[in-house]
Amino acid sequence: MSSRVRVTGDDLSLEEVGAVAGGAAVDTDLPDGTRSRMRASRRAVESILESGQAVYGVNTGFGRLSDVRVDREGLAELQVNLLRSHACGVGEPMEREEVRAMLLLRANALAAGYSGVRPAVATRLLELLDRDVTPVVPRAGSVGASGDLAPAAHLSLVLIGEGEARGPGGQRRPGGEALREAGLEPLELEPKEGLALLNGTQAMTAVGTLALLRAESLADAADVAGAVSLEGLRGSPDPFDPVVQEARPHPGQEASARRLRALLRDSEIRESHRYGDPRVQDAYSVRCMPQIHGAARHAIAHVRDVLEREVNAATDNPLVEADRPAGERVLSQGNFHGQPVASALDYLAVGVCHLATASERRTDRLLNPDLSDLPAFLTPEPGLRSGLMMAQVTAASRVAECRHAAEPASVGTIPTGAAKEDHVSMGMHAADQAERAVRAAEQVVAVELIAAVQAMEFHRPLRAGRGVESAASVLREEVPRVEEDRPLAGDMDAAVGLVRGGAMSRVVADSLADA
């Protein structure tokens, strides 16, 4: 990835979205080819306006009011009124990272050259990113029908010097004031440009993309936590054998099994109980990790495929086709509808929920003296001390959150817009629920990591697999062993940071490289 992310309209990666969300710089100069494509699209809109043809949202009202014609002298006011009237979001603001991702995605959608807007509109969105002006966007208010209308309206008001924004210091202030401090002038919208700023799936896609990137790290962390738990429980790695995966060749299953084998390589703990162990099979949460984690990987891979397409899609309505030999066309259609994204993000929530439920069951096996030969709650003096007893309770509470978040949002259509929008995607709800599921699952897996490393250390001086030992070393840099009872909240936060920050993914990568 270059030092500055460049917007072309057709080759933005999810990793670039994540980087810009986290503060990476953007190139505010659009490539020549992108600018030419946008100018051609803009000329087509101007040509159609000169012809007197009625074009939805350009010289007509919106939604149910699309049959109302607007005079030429009212066209600029029409676009401003659209932003103002649609800025009706409620609730807590979206996170800064989510809004930055949304700004980038909106600029990229316009850069595709189907929206009929000037290059200056996309450039101004990029300038907000470059100068760290972050619009204040209420989280609730979108049904994902004509896209994320309310969030996009709040985002776009700042372009015209209205709404609210945060500057580099994070202080909330009027949008016009934030622009002035950044050395920017309010943008004067021309016909269609307000509509082009609103229609699209960029809010749900922004939230969903950041959740997906975290889910990919989470899947690796679940494999690591599971491998450490297996060592702590003195389980068998035989179910991870390549022959088993070849007999049922699902890619996600094979990927998790390969990671587990790499993490467990050269385990002295395994060798100590390879022969003479009376147990024939481990519990499902241990034995079936490739199948359970692999199914989550399938969901994650599918969502990545959907979002990679969506971040480079033109989601405006109407779309402008400017390069036809027979002349320009303006096509009213439904690319703004969020169903593809909403359905995929529901699937993501379900996938990570299974990572969490299996993880919590392994944690219980580590702590419950009826299910292992380990000390109760992994404390040297059970009774006098409670050890990690309550950690499993916390994990159980977060699994409940995962289950709630995994209830599909995208089936909850409610007609809006005087029944003109008679089927909506609820895509923003699906994105929020996917993020909630990922956040809760990160916490569950973090608890397992703490418990699993504590359990594995009861088998000293025997060494665990190389990858497991690496993971334990990383955790121990942040979370000391629990000898005497202490508040665990800070330890859990530190472990969540390792899961979310990709530390366990790096352990996996190193283990695979050494295998």
Image: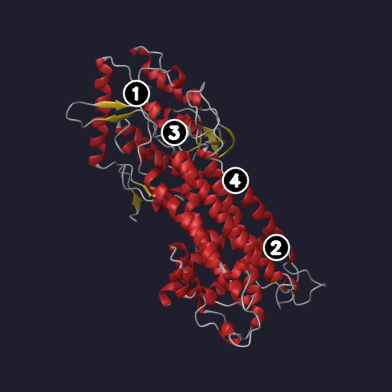
Instruction: Please provide percent x and percent y for residue 183.
Output: 40, 35
Furthest residue toward front: 247
Res 39 visible: yes
Q: Residue at x 49, y 79 (%)?
A: 265
Q: Looking at the image, is 149 positioned above or below residue 482?
A: above
Residue, disc 4: 407
Which of the pair 305/465 is nearer the observer? 305
Which of the pair 179/119 is nearer the observer? 119
Structural crowding at the residue carrying mark 3, measured as other residues with C-alpha within 10 Å and reported as few (<14), some (14–19) or many (≥20):
many
Of the residues under marks 3 and 2, which one precedes in the sequence? 3
Residue, disc 3: 179
Of the residues under marks 4 and 2, which one precedes in the sequence? 2
Which of the pair 249/71 is nearer the observer? 249
Which secondary structure, mark 1?
A: loop
Dot in front, 4 or 1: 4
Of the residues under marks 1 and 2, which one precedes in the sequence? 1
Dot in front, 4 or 2: 4
Of the residues under marks 3 and 1, which one precedes in the sequence? 3
Q: CA distance from mark 3 to mark 1?
A: 19 Å
Amino acid under label 2?
Answer: Gln
Q: Looking at the image, is 371 positioned above or below residue 33?
A: below
Q: CA distance from mark 4 to mark 1?
A: 42 Å
Q: CA distance from mark 3 to mark 4?
A: 41 Å
Of the residues under marks 3 and 4, which one precedes in the sequence? 3
Amino acid under label 1?
Answer: Glu
Q: CA distance from mark 1 to mark 2?
A: 58 Å
Which secondary structure, mark 3?
A: helix
Q: What label does residue 392 carry, if any?
A: 2
Furthest residue toward right: 384
Residue, disc 1: 190
Structural crowding at the residue carrying mark 1, measured as other residues with C-alpha within 10 Å and reported as few (<14), some (14–19) or many (≥20):
some
Structural crowding at the residue carrying mark 2, measured as other residues with C-alpha within 10 Å and reported as few (<14), some (14–19) or many (≥20):
many
